[in-house]
Amino acid sequence: MAVMVETGAMRAARIVGDLALFVEPLLFGQARLAIGHPLEAFYRDAWDYPDELGAVRAMCEWDPVRTREPAGWHRHPFTGRCRPDGDPDWEYNEADRQSHHNSEFNLPLRSQHER
C-alpha cells in the first residue's frame, strides 16, 4: 500500500516488514526510490527514475525481501551504475565511461613531427 504525501520532500511511502520504501522528487521531474529503516534519518540504498510515476510504480511492485533491487531504475547514485530505459542488459558504470571519455582528450601537447 502506498500513502501519498501532499507536501514535503517525500511523495509516497510503503512499509515492508521492518523496511520503509519511499519516493522523493528530484530536479527536472526525476524521482528517487529509497529504502531504509522507518526510524532512521537516512536511507540504506536508493535508485533514480526518469519520472515520479515510474518510481512510485516500482515502489508498489517491488518486494525487497525477494529481490535485491527494484525494476526500471536508470541510475544508482551510490555506485554510478546506469541502465538506459531501465534495461539491466544495457547497464554500465558512469565512472568507467568518464575515464574512457577523459582518455580521449589526453593528447600530447606536440606531435611527434614537431621536434
Image (tube, helix red, strand yellow):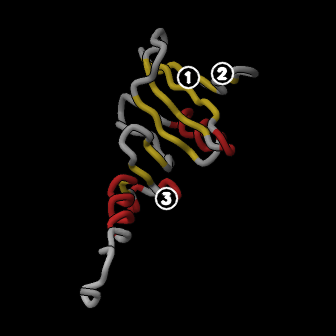
Residue sitting at 75 percent across and 22 percent down? 6
Q: Give the alpha-carbon distance from disc 2 to disc 3, as whole Å.
A: 29 Å
User: Could you tell me if the residues under marks 1 and 2 are in contact, i.e. CB atoms within 8 Å?
Assistant: yes
Separation of marks 1 and 2 at Cα, in angstroms: 7 Å
- In which quadrant of the rendered view does residue 110 lie? bottom left
Query: What amino acid is found at the position of numbered circle 2 in the picture?
Result: Val
Looking at the picture, how far across and down is residue 55, in whole percent? 58, 39
- Give the amino acid at mark 1: Arg
Q: Residues within 10 Å of mark 3 (few under 14, many from 20)?
A: some
Picture quarter with the N terminus: top right
Viewer-closest of 106 and 7? 106
Q: Position of residue 24 (x, y in %)?
A: 61, 30
* Residue in the image at 36% along x and 71% along y: 104
Mark 1 or mark 2, earlier in chain = 2
Which mark identifies residue 84? 3
- 49 to the left or right of 114: right
Q: Which residue corresponds to mark 2?
A: 3
Which residue position holds label 1? Answer: 14
Among all residues in the image, which is located at the extreme bottom? 113
Tag nearer the camera, 2 or 3 = 3
